[in-house]
Structure formats: C-alpha cells, structure tokens
Amino acid sequence: MSKETYQWLERELPSWVKEGLVSEGSAQALLQRYAGDKASSRSSGTAFSLLGFVLVGLGIISIFAYNWDELGHLERTLLAVLLLVGAQAFAFWVRRYRASDAALREGSGVFWFLMTGASLAIIGQTYHLGGSMLDFLSVWLVLSLGIAWVLPSSGAAFFQMILWTFVWLGSRDEMREVFSSEHSFLSPWMLALLALSWLGFYALRYRKERNAYATLLLGWALAVCVLAVGSVEMLLATYPEQNVRMLSMLFAFFFAIYYLLGKMYFFWGEKSWQRPFERMGKLGALVLVLAHVSFNAGTWLLRFDLEPTRYNSLLGLLLMLLFGVLLILFIRKEQKLPSEILVCAVPIIMLGYNLLHTMPYSAMLFVNASVILGAGWMIYCGIKEVTLGLVNQGMIVIALVIWIHFFNANFDLVAKGMAFIVTGILFLSLNAFLKRRFRGVA
C-alpha cells in the first residue's frame, strides 16, 4: 500500500466506525496491518541514509589512514576514543530526540558499528596488541552486539550478520589458511548464542514490520549468511574424501529446502527481489541440475566413485527429512503440485542420476528427460495461470539444455551463432503470441 493510500485509509476509518461499517478493533487492525507498507514508502530515504553514513564512516577512516604516520600514540588514542564516543553520543541523541526518523536511526546505527571497528583497529595498531584478523573480527562482533537493539537499527543488524558469518567461517579448522590464524577465542557455542541475538532481532522486526524494506534488508542478510555457512559446511564435510556425488545430493536438498522456505515463510512481497530465499534456492537448484545434463559430467564424476562417510550420510538424511516435511506442507497448503516442480524435483533427479552413475548414457538421458518434463510443466502451468514469466522460465531451461549439448558438439562458431539467432526468434515469436492470447483472456 502506498503512502497516499494509507493516509486516505487513516482519514476514512473514523467515519466508517461511526457509520457502523467496521468496529473500532477492526479499524485498528487494518491500520496495523498496513503500517509496514507505510514504512516501506520511506525506503529510498532510509537506503540513502544508510549509504551516506557508510560513505562518511569510510571517508573518516581513509583520511586518518592517510595521515597515520604523522600521529603519535596519544593522538591515536584520543582519536579512537573520540570516534567511538562521538558515534555513540550521536546514536543516543537520535534515539532520544529523533526516534521517529527511521532513516536517521538506521544510519546512526551503521555509523556506530563502523566507528567501533575503526576504534579497535586504531588501538590495536597503536599499542601493537598482536592477534590475528580473526581475533579483531571476533572482538568487533562482541562489542557491536547490542547496537541493533539499542536504537533499534536494522542496518547495524545487517552488518552484524555479515560479520558473524566471517567469524564463523574463520573459526573452521579448514579455513585457517584463508584467515592466517588459529581458532577464535569464541567457541562454537558462544558463536551460536551470538547468532541467537541477531536472529531474535530479526524475528522481532519481522513480527512488527514484516513489509518494511529494512526487514527485507535483514532477510537478504539472513539468506546470504545461511547460504554461505551451509555451502561451506557441506563442502568441508565432503572435501576429505572428495565425494562429489554426495556433495551434489547435499546441495540438491539444500537448494530445494531454500526454495520451499522462501515460498511458504521467508518472503516480503511478490517481486523477485523481495523473495531472496526462493530466488537463491531456485537458481542454485537449476544450475546444479543443468550442470549434469551433458555426457561429460557423468564421465568426470566416475573418477570420484567413493562411498559416503557416516557423517555425510547422517547430514544427507537430515536434509532429506526436512525436504520431505516442507514439500508435504507446501502441497497441503497449496492443494496442488508446485508450478516450478522442476526445482522441487532436483533432489529426486540427482538421486536417480547418482544411482545410474555407472552407466553415463543412461544417467544423462534420465537427467535430460526429467529437466525437459519439468520445464514443460512450467510452460503448461504458465499458460494455464496466464503467467508469461513462468512460460519464459520453462523455455529458457529447455533452451539451455539444447545449448549445452550444442556447445559440446563439434560445430563451428557460425553454426553456434545461427543457433542463438533461431532461438531468439522463437522466443520473440512465442512471447508475442502469448501476450496477445493473455490479453484476450484478461
């Protein structure tokens, strides 16, 4: 709902209550229902505020970094204290006198977060406290934990999630070389408790302002962080044995779960950029299955014909159970098969592919047939539901299957260029035809 529509609703509701059209409780419920939409109308101001404070913070850091060698120990210490206290004082002033200004509140939280890191870096460099990059990030994570809650600031929580992800990944034994450090002084249990903090903040924002763009920002951070941590954990779980087939199964279930969670629970609107879980899950699942449509993929996987470990099998079983539960809940909720059934079927396709991996041609035919059938179902549902975007998605998947086989063949660039031209003409023609047909249906 736009800001103007919300204001109109505020003006009209009192007269509706007097006329008995709605009760007082219903009127308040309507206002609360669309309060998040009202807040979302100020999204551009909040976005520019966040960007402005980030640029100011980075600019201050750059200026002092340029003049770093000319500053003594005392000047550096005073500078660190001034930056931190100044950022805190400004944030508390905003909290006290401008709490209703969401853009200023969000920006001050981000500025406080950046100045906390800058102050830590200055103190560490000045007094040569030692430690690794992971130690620095861990201290920064702990000291900035309460910023989001104090103001509150979704922007600060966004950076908190990203910082937590770096610390978690850096604490893994296999990631030591990347961060050039030993273990973080934060144990896995401590990191899990810290994660509960920003998850709790996100849950609070989701309950109060689900449709606000600040909540959508947190949703993107949550989607990216969980994707990064989950992907690395699955890679590390299968890396010692180089079990590529098991890894493909884990990713298939993971992406399908992401997609189903995004369809049912984690979404903030109908547009693509408002549904990060669904879009990431769909993209990952389709890329994974398309990577297996060629014959070359099967011959390459034969070099990694290894048995999964007990831990990998347990992880795969847990993901399979979660996928099954979510799929059943989705079908019960929608009372039909999903239009993008290909995404949900990717785990089943990958399971069949791995069972047939000793017969590369049979495995390739199974995957290709499954992908084409799934894409055909998307096209059928798109025509039935009068959704041109769904039709185009199915056509793109089929075209990609054809192009993958075409590029694996020994054709010259002229033939490949002609294939692109013919495919483009078919897309344009079918789109024009369907647009006319859908316009007639509407």
Image (spheres, helix red, strand yellow):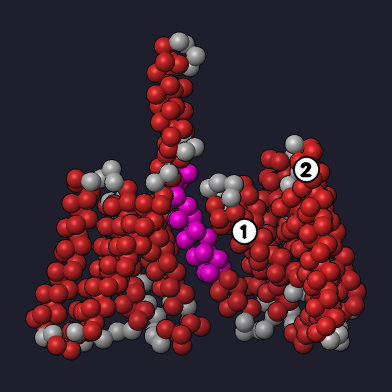
Does residue 218 sit above or below 296 in this rendering? above
- In the image, is 113 to the left or to the right of 397? left
Earlier along the polypeptide chain: callout 1 or callout 2? 1
Q: Quadrant of residue 67?
A: bottom left
Q: Is residue 307 visible?
A: yes
Q: Residue at x 39, y 24 (%)?
A: 11
The answer to whether residue 229 is magenta is yes
Q: Nearer the viewer, residue 32 or 435?
A: 435
Does residue 175 sit above or below 342 in this rendering? below
Q: Amino acid at mark 1?
A: Arg
How many numbered dots are placed on residues in this image? 2
Question: Where residue 438 is drawn, which disc sits there?
Answer: 2
Q: Residue at x 63, y 49 (%)?
A: 263
Which region shows up in magenta?
204-230
Q: Secondary structure at mark 2?
A: helix
Q: Secondary structure at mark 1?
A: helix
Q: Residue at x 36, y 62 (%)?
A: 51
